[in-house]
Amino acid sequence: MNSLARRSLSVRLPRSSLGGIRWSTSCAPSASSFATPSFPCVDAHAARESRIIASSVSRFSQSSSPRSSSTDTGPEPPYARPSPLSYNTYHHPYPLPLTYGATLPSFDIAYETWGTLSPNRDNVILLHTGLSASSHAASTQLNPTDGWWEKFIGPGRALDTNQFFVVCTNVLAGCYGSTGPSSFDPTTGERYATRFPVLSIFDMVRAQFSLLDHLGVQRLYASVGSSMGAMQSLATGWLFPERVGKIVSISGTARSSPGSIAMRHAQRSVLMADPNWNNGFYYDGLPPHTGMKLARQIATITYRSGPEWDQRFGRKLRTPTQSTSPSTSGELSPPRSPTLCPDFLIETYLDHQGEQFCLKYDANSLLYISKAMDLFDLTLPAIEELGMNLPSPPSSRSSSSSSTSLMSPAPVSVVTSSKSHPPPLNSAPHLPDLAAGLRPLSSTPTLVLGVQSDILFPVEQQRELVDALRMAGNSRVSYFELGGVWGHDTFLLDVLNVGGAIRGFLS
Amino acid sequence: MNSLARRSLSVRLPRSSLGGIRWSTSCAPSASSFATPSFPCVDAHAARESRIIASSVSRFSQSSSPRSSSTDTGPEPPYARPSPLSYNTYHHPYPLPLTYGATLPSFDIAYETWGTLSPNRDNVILLHTGLSASSHAASTQLNPTDGWWEKFIGPGRALDTNQFFVVCTNVLAGCYGSTGPSSFDPTTGERYATRFPVLSIFDMVRAQFSLLDHLGVQRLYASVGSSMGAMQSLATGWLFPERVGKIVSISGTARSSPGSIAMRHAQRSVLMADPNWNNGFYYDGLPPHTGMKLARQIATITYRSGPEWDQRFGRKLRTPTQSTSPSTSGELSPPRSPTLCPDFLIETYLDHQGEQFCLKYDANSLLYISKAMDLFDLTLPAIEELGMNLPSPPSSRSSSSSSTSLMSPAPVSVVTSSKSHPPPLNSAPHLPDLAAGLRPLSSTPTLVLGVQSDILFPVEQQRELVDALRMAGNSRVSYFELGGVWGHDTFLLDVLNVGGAIRGFLS
């Protein structure tokens, strides 16, 4: 009756031909002597902390940094070190009133440029970054290392520096030279930390326009951005319709969805639960490196796609950390059993992404910018709740300039189908509200580019944006959907298609 | 030149007609007096810990539990309390050899049943649970509270108790009555904790079959499961082809993908980083409730879908926690500014899901079962790496019984298309390996049911399973794809379609 007892495990055959590391019983504890286990994946957090402390002591003892004041005795992460003068900084000495009521007394914006400003100052492209990028979009003389969009910027590239003067800023609330929570509040001399006010995407764009004013740039040839940068790109044309010639929105949205809020919420929750976060006041102590690492792991999952991982990693196992001598050809790696720590290559990939990021970026910057993304919503009711008026689109400026007419419901036209997809079968109920809110963009040529494998800004949101712009009366909306398995990160990788679409649209 | 200075924020109009809570400036700090902020969403973790300690002291002072020994002075979570005898327990007094080499000296399996065992004992349906469910799939006389599949089990329901005798177990490694890491090791008298051996889905199924042996059930009418239960359902038919009549696999897979491993890795990482986890030895102290809450938040994101949240929550704001008196009709809620803590209803929903779960389930059980899901892989090379032989499918049993012939490559037939979808354009490269590994299932009627909005076990994996089963020679594969917005959780919610498909297949 007891077939289980009869069914014993069959003989284990070594199968070196399979190449991978084999699960094996040879290291496993026997029945009654389960050993007390160790968890190198957890010990890694404490080890990282020890390294931070050690490097901090070492750096502090050698440091002659002008920022090493008595309020700044903690370990300085790279972004807080004195600028290597690898970028320009615009200091705005006047107050900036913010969307949610607070006012920044003054601020800095770090920026870099590529190409040559034309005599008429009419060839400027404002390039917006994603959440965590710096102004270093491409290599410069000041900083010859590759930038985050290196292959998209240069002579003959998507942003052609033979033709355009490209400006990229570190975003307000960031930590790469622009004012953010890690900056010192000029009114108190202390770091803002979480006393920094919650910002909106609008506030970031207004800060960028004060830089453009400073540069004497009245009108942009185009505003270009991906991910959060696409939100900024849309907000740029929305806030200043007369000052923006064209808009490029890649893998973005005009209304953050609850799905994307959920994924950012998970990251913020994990980060803020790290005791080192200390309500945001960690600058004199240890940074919340573990929370940052865990948050970045979650973020990384939303940046790529399962199909890509299946192609790249499949179910390959990680290589053992404590290898003996390098194995020669045909030699088997030492067999081991699965553990509760990472076993698969996909796990060590995520681990590595988290490790790489966790000390390069300010945790509070992540929180503020992540929240600004959640808050972004160009539907008319949301705009009205902010007490903001809709700017007039340039074409309707002469005929209707009173705020009364702007607040009236926008004319809702029939949804036109794009060339690359049929009209939506079940339009989102907020589509008319979004179309009404997008009226300021109704006459600005706009390129929308979406990726079918994107789970953070899914293709449905791209179609929604296109439909809403067309409902708002915009007859110059170009829309492309890209396939492939790169997910949200496609905008960083697909030079051929993303670059080609931009180049065609801008020319 | 400075258009920013000219462009002031417009007058803020109260818009009570919008119904929602308005962002407002009235509570915001002024420019130079940013107040030190508070973070109730973070304080919640400490508050929860205080409640745990208080309830533990109170429970311990009143307790006469036989389990309250000197090694058990910590707070007892609900699952560790003495059984209310709401389920049956089968004690297996013999050793269970495990897939990865260790052996459990003995084990318990908690189970519940519905319906009446036929005289021939040929009407048994073994129902497998998802990761965290108990054996309480539906209400019983012993436990009249609703079960997790209440509407699917009963007279005339999907699992028709007029016809079938349904058995559901708490899975091995679980914490609801079956032996798991929170159980006491009989050889030492101490809790296993993370000395518990890593298990496979096969091990869980073997433990279930020792229960079936005990019940005198030689052959199942059907094996039914969803999510991890679908893995078990497939493993049941795979391990014991002659003892399983039909298989139902709902939103499962025969090969865990790196995408789903990534999502479970994120959960395990967050949980294991909680200092309370203490390498798994927390039973005498405080449980890792914060890590569990954060892990459950991530899991919840993978269980539902963005479109559902857009329908259910949209961008609605959460209601303020410190409300004054209930507002009468037309009265506005007190206005507030956005914070770094949750502002949106979707965030409080995730918070709530985490809070509800974090003390109901054993953290170590979550880790072990989550890992077992990662390890599940029925491709032939993976089976061979385990040193396991492929069982013979019933139909080929008489013609080929030697292990040599079983190890030879399986015949790969042309992929047949299902009625509900076209053949895959780009088959996964592992499809032939999966088909070869699934040979033991080649003659078992199998229902595969997938959900198009599922991001954890995406529909591509369902199609892959169907294609592989057909390639393996199974001509009795039924396949349904469901639409809707419920994502992975569809199997818990869609009584009409999920229930209907099962009922049709079983009859």
Image: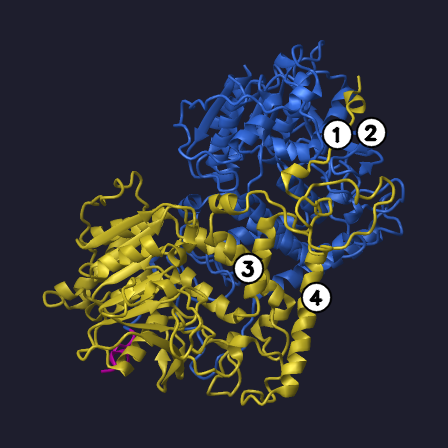
Chain colours: A blue, B yellow
As shown in the figure, which amino acid type bears the numbered disc 1? Ala
Q: Amino acid at mark 3?
A: Gln
Q: Position of residue A418 (x, y in %)?
A: 43, 23
Q: Position of residue B346 (x, y in %)?
A: 57, 49
Q: Secondary structure at mark 4?
A: helix
Labels 3 & 2 near each other (Cβ < 8 A): no
Position of the C terminus of chain B, as image quadrant, is bottom left
Q: Which residues are magenta?
A: A1-9
Q: Chain of mark 4?
A: B
**Mark 2 or mark 1, which is nearer the start of the sequence?**
2
Residue designated by label 2: A92
Residues under labels 3 and 2: Cα distance? 45 Å
Residue B34 placement, left or right of B402: right
Question: Which residue is located at x 71 percent, y 9 percent?
Answer: A120
Left or right of A298: which side holds B25? right
Tell me which chain the residue with mark 3 is part of.
B
Task: Say if residue B471 shows up in the picture.
Answer: yes
User: Around disc 1, counting alpha carbons within 10 Å, would you say few (fewer than 14), some (14 to 19), or many (20 or more)?
Assistant: many
Please say if A279 is above or below A242.
below
Horizontal arrangement in the rendering, residue B386 relative to residue B53 (left or right): left
- Magenta highlight on residue B233: no
x then y, percent, for residue B481: 31, 47
Subunit of mark 1? A
Query: Quadrant location of the N terminus of chain B?
Result: top right
Q: Which mark is residue A207?
A: 1
